[in-house]
Amino acid sequence: MNTLSYGLLSLLTKHSRTGYELMQHIQPFWQAKHSQIYPLLALLEQKGYVAFVHVPQSDKPDKKVYSITDLGKEAIRHWIKEPTDDPVFRDELALKVYCISLVDKEHALKLLADRKVYYVKKKERFNQLFDKFKEESGKDLEDLEITDLQFGPYVLVRKAMMKVDADLTWCEWMKKKLH
Amino acid sequence: MNTLSYGLLSLLTKHSRTGYELMQHIQPFWQAKHSQIYPLLALLEQKGYVAFVHVPQSDKPDKKVYSITDLGKEAIRHWIKEPTDDPVFRDELALKVYCISLVDKEHALKLLADRKVYYVKKKERFNQLFDKFKEESGKDLEDLEITDLQFGPYVLVRKAMMKVDADLTWCEWMKKKLH
DNA sequence: TAATGCATGTAAGTAGTTACATGATTCC
DNA sequence: GGAATCATGTAACTACTTACATGCATTA
């Protein structure tokens, strides 16, 4: 069982989803393609950690809706208590910035401007997610308890928002430094 | 040529280093093991992007000190101008936090406390790096120009410091939420 | 009419990790 | 006496990406 497998189980604790939906919703936390997810779901099903129902559709392709089993929930509880891997962060931009003195100011500004566009889009997506949370849960988000299924996803959105703000602050700081 | 290969070239623009040193210094920007780096250095040497001198040592194992060639610098200038890959961030903690409602408050606090230790250590390392920069460059770090070889590494340390502060802020915020 | 979204899957390739291998020195 | 650091390398494995494959509906 690799980390992504546990990640898929984790997403299924909130509600049932198709492989396609899992692929979409895991993106903010773990970048994975459908070609990696579908075989893992088959393995999870073999092990009895998930179960699926086949749902035929007429306008769209048929789908498999996966749910987590009690065995799957047990596996998750065990996993959470084990030591956590250090986060892995790989950014080509950082490697380019390291040797930025090799190119002129214009190219450096282009590099930064492109990345800023990426961060701004990301921020918008998280803002939308945040608004969706506000709609879904009737009460004030700040009153969510750890026992609430929404708690985890909510605090993760807050984490992502804090980080993207730090990234944008750096972009602005850099722009000023380059005049 | 993969991204890590360009990363190695990038580190060599500052000064010559051994494979072992490259492995150590690329860690903050790109996590890679020596077993991945040594074969890539051999390829870079074959292509004429780097050159090495064999340095025998008596107390420690002999080493190969690599330098970037003019051809290597050309390759880097071309790479910087090409579109940059989106950053990849994979954090097992995020996946665990997603389904944190499955475990009790004590386990959640343990999870957070462990990660805080990791971030505090990281912050210390960056503070030390920052101090080393201050020593090395005679002038005020804020006066560094893009043409200065130190500029890139310096702004990256600042980026890392901003991000680790955001991470620690989130940890504190979480701790309060969990009482 | 070309692209995008929905929806699943496999095959082939690249990237990254873990383990094996060696050996002196230093630190606890 | 055992672990960590320096220093290089290869072998085997796992994880991840890209490409191939299908097909209908909607949108630009």
Image (tube, coloured by chain):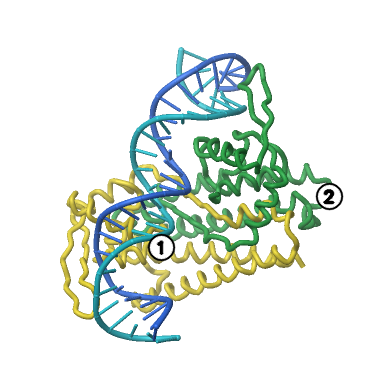
Chain colours: A yellow, B green, C blue, D cyan
The one of B15 and B177 positioned closer to us in this rendering: B15
At which x and y percent is residue A45? 19, 54
Q: Provide the residue designation for mark 2.
A: B139
The answer to whether residue A109 shows anywhere in this view is yes
The amino acid marked with disc number 2 is Lys
Which label is found at residue A27? Answer: 1
User: Quick one: SS at disc 1?
Assistant: loop
Pick the residue in front: A135 or B14: B14
Say which element carries label 2.
loop
Chain holding disc 1? A
Measure the alpha-carbon separation of dots 1 and 2: 43 Å
Q: Is residue A91 left or right of residue A72?
A: right
Q: As shown in the figure, which amino acid type bears the numbered disc 1?
A: Gln
Judge by depth and name the residue closer to the eye, A20 or B125: A20
Vertical side of B44 occupied by A144: above or below: below
* Picture quadrant of residue C19: top left
